[in-house]
Amino acid sequence: MKTSEFLKAACTIGCIAFALNATAQTNGSAPPEDSQTMGQHLDDGTITAKVKADLLTAKNVKSTHIHVRTRQGIVWLSGTVPTVEDKAAAEDVAQNVAGVAGVKNHLKVAED
C-alpha cells in the first residue's frame, strides 16, 4: 500500500472516530429549546464524518483545507480550494453522501 493511500485511510478512520466520539458526549444539562434531538445530532455527526472521509478520498478534489459542518442534514462547506472545479467537485461529493438534505457551498477559490 502506498504511503499516501495509508495516510488517507488513517485520516478517514480518525475523522469518523472523532465525529462519533464527539456526538456521544453529553454535559448532563438540559438542552436549549431550539436545539437538536440526540438522534438529529448523531445523524449530523455521522453525515459530517462521511462527507469529510469522502472528500479526503475523492480524486477530483485537491484540497485538504475544507471544513464541514452539518445541521439538520444541511452540509456547510467552508475553507479554500485551488480551483473552481475543485469547489464544484467538493459540493458534488457532499451532495452524494447518504442523509444529506442540501449543501451550502461557501468554499473560496485560492488566489495565486
Image (tube, rainbow, N blue to C red):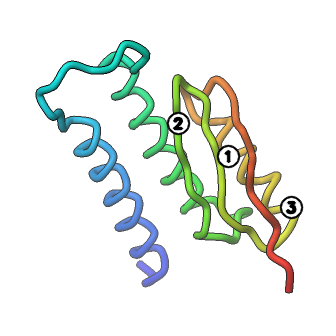
Mark 2: few, some, or many residues within 10 Å (few <14, many ≥20)?
A: many
Residue 22 quadrant = top left
Q: Is residue 22 above or below residue 59?
A: above
Q: Amino acid at mark 3?
A: Glu
Find the distance from the CA under tag 3 to the CA under tag 2.
Answer: 23 Å
- Decide if residue 4 is on the left or right side of residue 32: right
- Percent position of residue 9, x then y: 40, 65
Q: Nearer the viewer, residue 12 or 101?
A: 101
- Residue indicated by mark 2: 70
Mark 3: secondary structure:
helix
- Residue indicated by mark 3: 85
Mark 3: few, some, or many residues within 10 Å (few <14, many ≥20)?
A: some
At x 47% / y 74%, what residue is drawn?
5
How many marks on residues?
3
Asked if the residues shown at circle 1 and circle 2 are in contact, with their CB atoms under 8 angstroms apart, the answer is no
At x 82% / y 68%, what residue is drawn?
109
- Decide if residue 7 is on the left or right side of residue 112: left
Which of the marked residues, 3 or 2, is nearer the chain's N terminus? Answer: 2
Q: Is residue 97 above or below residue 54?
A: above
Which of the marked residues, 1 or 3, is nearer the chain's N terminus? Answer: 3
Which of the marked residues, 1 or 2, is nearer the chain's N terminus? Answer: 2
- Percent position of residue 102, x then y: 69, 28
Q: Amino acid at mark 1?
A: Val
Residue 1 quadrant = bottom left
- Residue indicated by mark 1: 93
